[in-house]
Image: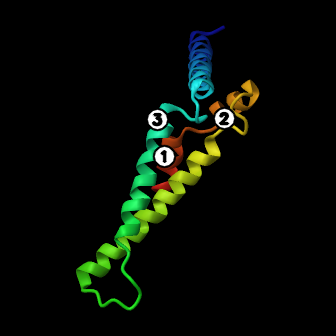
């Protein structure tokens, strides 16, 4: 086997081992969690829920006369609330169907992480 092929093969093997270790680590984190989420996803869900709450407080009643700056703030709050709801939906999708099933936990751990999904969402 030529040296470049051997280096490529070794690189692929190391990538596979790294991926497997991350999946196992995430599965252990999800399985040990009461909510079925990793600690990172729990924090993200909490922040998004709080953002929804804060943004809902910035909504103005219908028929209220707003200045240009208030309209801009209301629009920004509406967009933040929409993104927060999308984040919460993504977190819900990443939860295993049953928290006591090792198979469901393994499947949930293979799903893309929330941070990867969020990077796609913000594009």
Residue located beneath label 1 in the image? 45
Q: Classify mark 3: helix, strand or loop.
A: helix
Q: Nearer the viewer, mark 2 or mark 1?
A: 1
Percent x, y of residue 55: 38, 65
Q: Is residue 58 above or below residue 68?
A: above
Q: Position of residue 34 (x, y in %)?
A: 58, 31
Height in image: 90 above or below 62?
A: above
Q: For marks 1 and 3, give the CA distance.
A: 9 Å
Instruction: Residue at 63% x, 40% y: name it.
Output: 95
Is 71 above or below relative to 52?
below
Compare marks 2 and 1 and give the one earlier in the sequence.
Answer: 1
> In the rendering, which numbered label is found on residue 108?
2
Which residue, given by chain and number where applicable, does mark 3 sit on? 40
Q: Which residue is rendered at x = 56% and y = 46% of the image?
A: 91
Mark 1 or mark 3, earlier in chain: 3
Closest to the observer: 25 or 33? 33
Q: CA distance from mark 2 to mark 1?
A: 16 Å
Q: Is residue 27 above or below residue 14?
A: below
- Which residue occupies the foreground of this view, 21 or 48? 48
> Element under label 1?
helix
Q: How is the image coloured?
A: rainbow
Assess disc 3: are there few (<14), some (14-19) or many (≥20) residues with their C-alpha within 10 Å of its C-alpha: few
Task: Tell me the crowding category of disc 2: few under 14, some 14 to 19, or many 20 or more residues within 10 angstroms, Cα based.
Answer: many
Residue at 45 percent across and 53 percent down: it is 49
Q: Is residue 57 left or right of residue 45?
A: left
First in residue order: circle 3 vs circle 2 = 3
């Amino acid at each position: 086997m030529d040296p470049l092929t051997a280096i490529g093969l070794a690189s692929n093997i190391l990538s596979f081992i790294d991926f497997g270790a991350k999946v196992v680590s995430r599965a252990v984190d999800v399985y040990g969690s009461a909510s079925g989420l990793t600690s990172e996803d729990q924090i993200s869900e909490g922040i998004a829920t709080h953002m929804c709450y804060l943004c809902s407080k910035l909504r103005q009643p219908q028929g209220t006369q707003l200045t240009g700056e208030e309209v801009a703030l209301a629009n920004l709050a509406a967009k933040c609330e929409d993104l927060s709801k999308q984040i919460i939906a993504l977190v819900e999708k990443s939860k295993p169907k049953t928290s006591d099933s090792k198979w469901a936990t393994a499947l949930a751990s293979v799903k893309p992480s929330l941070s990867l999904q969020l990077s796609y969402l913000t594009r």
